[in-house]
Amino acid sequence: MTKKRSGFTLAEMIIAVAILSVASVYVVQMLVVTKNLRTRSYEIDRSVRISKNIIELISSGESISDSKDELLLKMQAEDGMYILNFDEDFNITQEKDALYKLFMTMDTKDGLDNINIKINRLKPYILDNKKSLEISDINSIKMQRIKSNN
């Protein structure tokens, strides 16, 4: 009488491990893509909020040089452009710690204020080779605020 063995052979184990390793590569790639998309979504939301806040402050008559708002007060003028650096949580920071950089230009033409705000990411996403990415580019044209003489 021969005894029948139950279990897996070495060949079956090697094939199973190979299939699992190929499948796990795709799962890891999907996790990375999902994390990058979540990060991009967060960045777009925050950058649009910051840009709209700045545009509303300027449209309401706030001056960059003597504002009470931290966003406007911390902007640095450089080559006709205002620059502001943010860390990974969109808190204002120094340039050496920055992950995001805001560039703002303003000009007045024909009684209209033209405000352009761009926010760029300075470091690439996970498994991405792009050095710098534009997160948002918001352009606003508003009528100049009429100052009363009262």
Image (spheres, rainbow, N blue to C red):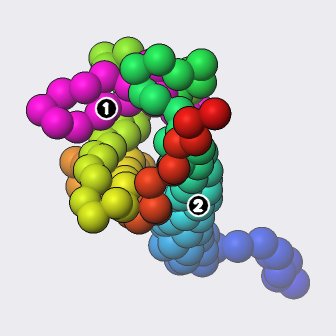
Q: Earlier in the sequence, mark 1 or mark 2?
A: 2
Residue 135: numbered disc: none
In which image quadrant can residue 83 be found? top left
Q: Residue at x 47, y 17 (%)?
A: 66
Tag 2: residue type?
Ser
In depth, the one of 42 and 21 nearer the eye is 42
Mark 1 or 2, closer to the camera: 1
Q: For mark 1, does the 10 Å Cα neighbourhood hold few (<14), some (14 to 19), or many (20 or more) residues? A: many
Please, what secondary structure does the residue beneath circle 2 have? helix
Residue 41: numbered disc: 2
Answer whether labels 1 and 2 touch (C-beta < 8 Å).
Answer: no
Q: Position of residue 23 (x, y in %)?
A: 55, 74
Seen in the picture, residue 105 relative to 84 is either above or below; the reply is: below
Q: Residue furthest front?
A: 150
In depth, the one of 61 and 1 nearer the eye is 61
In which image quadrant can residue 104 be found? top left
In the rendered structure, which segment of residues is drawn in magenta?
72-90
Q: Position of residue 8 (x, y in %)?
A: 70, 73
Left or right: 3, with 94 as reference point: right
Is 88 part of what is drawn in magenta? yes
Q: Position of residue 70 (x, y in %)?
A: 56, 21
Q: Can you identify the residue that label 1 sits on?
A: 83
Q: Is residue 138 visible?
A: no
Q: For mark 2, does the 10 Å Cα neighbourhood hold few (<14), some (14 to 19), or many (20 or more) residues? A: few
Please, what secondary structure does the residue beneath circle 1 have? strand
Is 105 part of what is drawn in magenta? no
In which image quadrant can residue 65 be found? top left
Tag 1: residue type?
Ile
